[in-house]
Image (spheres, rainbow, N blue to C red):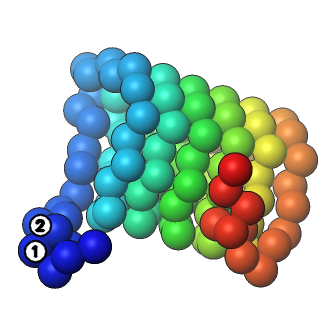
Amino acid sequence: MNAEYQTIASTLTIPRRASIEGAIDFPGPVVIDGTLVGEVRAASLIISERGSLKGSIWAGSVVVMGEVAGDIYAVTLTLKTACSVQGNIFHRHLELEDGCYFEGKSRRHNEPLALIP
């Protein structure tokens, strides 16, 4: 990756009323306030309270406050109160807040991003 590309990476936000179908591969942070059907590869990802993602996630840091249906590969994963995650998670650090909903298998791995298919 060249230096110019790295410096232009700011936060990519999917607005609340947006609905996108497809894959996102972004070198910086991504925030999903709307709906995404597809996969996300990013430095970090936040899914807001009203955000929804149906697909896989690969990111260094992931915070879920909304809904995810798909597998998550993250070094650090936080499932916040009232979120819903259905899928398998692969992580190094996991934080589950009281009241989060998780259905699937959890696997701790020292290098979860190395498991990317």
Q: Residue at x 68, y 68 (%)?
A: 114
Q: Is residue 13 above or below residue 45?
A: above
Q: Secondary structure at mark 2?
A: loop
- Name the residue tied to disc 2: 8
Disc 1: CA contacts within 10 A as few (<14), some (14-19) or many (>=20)? few
Q: Secondary structure at mark 1?
A: helix
Disc 2: CA contacts within 10 A as few (<14), some (14-19) or many (>=20)? few
Q: Residue at x 73, y 61 (%)?
A: 115
- Residue 6: x and y in percent read 20, 73
- Residue 94: x and y in percent read 73, 68
Q: Amino acid at mark 2?
A: Ile
- Residue 69: x and y in percent read 66, 30
Q: Is residue 3 above or below residue 76?
A: below
Q: Are marks 1 and 2 in contact (CB under 8 Å)?
A: yes
Please state which of residues 105 and 65 is positioned toward the viewer in this rendering: 105
Q: Amino acid at mark 1?
A: Glu
- Number of on-image labels: 2
Q: Residue at x 42, y 34 (%)?
A: 23
- Name the residue tied to disc 1: 4
Residue 21 visible in the current orientation:
yes
Q: Is residue 15 left or right of residue 48?
A: left
